[in-house]
Each structure stands twice: as C-alpha cells, then as structure tokens.
Amino acid sequence: MTFNRPESLGRCLESLSKQTFPSVMFEVVIVDGSVVPAREVVTKLRDRLDIQHLIGPNLGIAGNRNRGASHARGACLAFMDDDCVARPDWLERIDSAFQTTPHAMIGGGVENVSPENAYAAAGQVITEAVMAYFNPPEQEPTFFPGLNFAISRQAFLELGGCDSQFQLLGGGEDRDFIDRWRHANGSLVSCPEAIVRHEHRSSLRGFVRQYFHYGRGGWLYQRLKRESGRANLPEQFKPTRSMSECLQSPLQQLAGGMRWKVRGLIWLWWFSYRCGIIWQAMIELVKSRKPNPKAEDKKIEEFPAVSDDHDHHKETR
C-alpha cells in the first residue's frame, strides 16, 4: 500500500525495476489510498514493470493488504512497504526460498537507509532487537515485520488475510496474522539475504507517532488474541534473552555519540509504545460502557489513527 508518499513510492518502484529476477516473471500490485493518487509516479515505471494500480479509500494496512492479495494473479505474494528499497537480488532470493519451502511464510532482512539520523538509527536498532527476541538461534522464527515477507497467495486467502478489525491502526496486524498462521500449523522460514532498505522515521514527531500507534495496535492484538483463545495455545517460542539483552548487540554497532543518542530514544520508544497501549485501553473501556455506542455526543475524542507503515504489494508467479 501507499499513502501520500509519492517520492518514497518512486524509489521503491525504481528498485523493483532493477531486480535480477526477470520482470516478465512478476507483477507489482499497488494499493493507493492517497488523497492525490500517485498516477504520475506509476506512469513513469509502466514501461519497465507490470503494474496493477488500485486506487481507492485507505482501508488501513490490513484492509489494503487484503485488497492487493485479492487482485494479485501469481502463486506467491511478496509484501514490501512503499518506504522501502529492495536490493537487486531481493525477489530472486524470495523466489528461491519459496521454491524450496512453498508452504512456509518467508521473512527477509531489513537495513537502514539513513544510519546518520538518530531517529532512523533507533528505529533500526529496535527492529533488529525485536527480531532477535522473537527469533532465537536454533528455534523456528515466530515473527517477521510486515514490511518484508512472502507467502503463498492461496494460503493467505484461505486464512482470511489480515484482520480488518485493525482498520487504520498501524502495528499489530502482522503479529496477529502470524499468530493465526502458526495456530493453523503454518511454519516460518527466515531468509535474511532477501534484504530491503527501510526509510525509518527521521523526526521526533514521526518517531513518537509511529510507536504510539504501534502501542495502540499492540493492545488490540493482545485483546483479539485473548478473545480467540490463542492466548492459551502452547507456544513453541521460548525467549533465550530479554529485550534489554537483544538491544545491546545492535547498539554496540553504533559509534559512541550516536549510541548515546539512540539509548535515549530507546526510552522514548518504550514510553510512546506504552502510552499507545494505555490510550487504546481507555478508548475501548469508555466504548464498552456507553449505553448508546452510536451517540456522537458521548463519543471519546481519539487521536487520528493514521498508519505509518503503508504496504505496497508484489507477487511473483
């Protein structure tokens, strides 16, 4: 999906036009919920890529992923955000992994586009720490971020796609989908060589806003997990390190001055995420106590839940 980021989308599409994987072997499905659709950006790349440009209202990450998947024509769906740039061999790596393990969900690697920016560097450290926490060595992975994963189109649709209850909330829909996938005995396979370079948030406002909304999505994810009974499912995942320990390795790779800046932003991440959890919990508590949920005069004012991770879908066939 793309939403009001034509420059980022242009860089994303440019990277797909330079793949080592033959362009006749894949299509690009763009679900465009932008206020002003990115027609000009798409037109420039049509002579190099087979593109479906789906224009419509913003249904949120989950809804737009589902829309893209329903229109795709190939056997494999490869999802990537519009603010990511794929390495030239990205699709080739994804296709190779899919041919080897066609019934598994495949997760790729993530690099930072702007390592000189403290907010972006913090976002990369957080991404690496979360993946290290949920994917310990010698255990099957249990989580991949939604900005770089692939799965059989048939399996994705049979599972019902992403849960549309997440609506415009960013964060949580990928964890929910993976939970349901694992609950259905689906396996996850890591393919760290299939790399995309991510444009992490590069400002204070963007950083706080993103993780605040991730907290909101995280609360909804936990509630849906409890209600579905998956909270009582025996977990294969057994953490071997705490999150604090997982943060140390990527932090140590940073230069001294940048490392201290990022350490401070780690605390801001923690605070923003938990504020999002609390805010979403309060919203749902107030809604549950309303005698008339449709009464607009009693409706709690919510922060706009504008998704920060907007997905652009590809599919190999």
Image: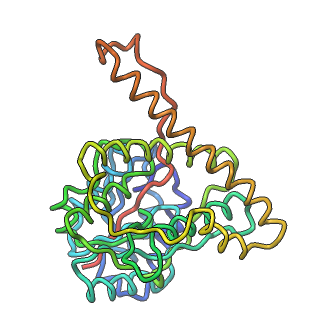
Q: Would residue 94 be visible to someone looking at this image?
A: yes
Scheme of colours in the image: rainbow
Q: Relative to 66, is 262 on the left or the right?
A: right
Number of numbered markers: 0
Residue 113: horizontal and vertical position, in percent?
A: 63, 70
Q: Is residue 153 above or below residue 96?
A: above
Residue 277: horizontal and vertical position, in percent?
A: 50, 40
Q: Quadrant of the C terminus?
A: bottom left
Q: Relative to 256, is 242 on the left or the right?
A: left
Residue 151: horizontal and vertical position, in percent?
A: 28, 72
Q: Residue at x 80, y 73 (%)?
A: 255
Q: Is residue 263 above or below residue 196?
A: above
Residue 76: horizontal and vertical position, in percent?
A: 26, 75
Q: Residue at x 37, y 47 (%)?
A: 221
Q: Relative to 122, is 159 on the left or the right?
A: left
Q: Nearer the viewer, residue 138 or 269?
A: 138
Q: Residue at x 53, y 39 (%)?
A: 276
Q: Nearer the viewer, residue 43 or 317?
A: 317
Q: Would residue 57 be visible to someone looking at this image?
A: no
Q: Residue at x 39, y 81 (%)?
A: 91
Q: Quadrant of the N terminus?
A: bottom left
Q: Find the residue positioned furthest to the right.
A: 257
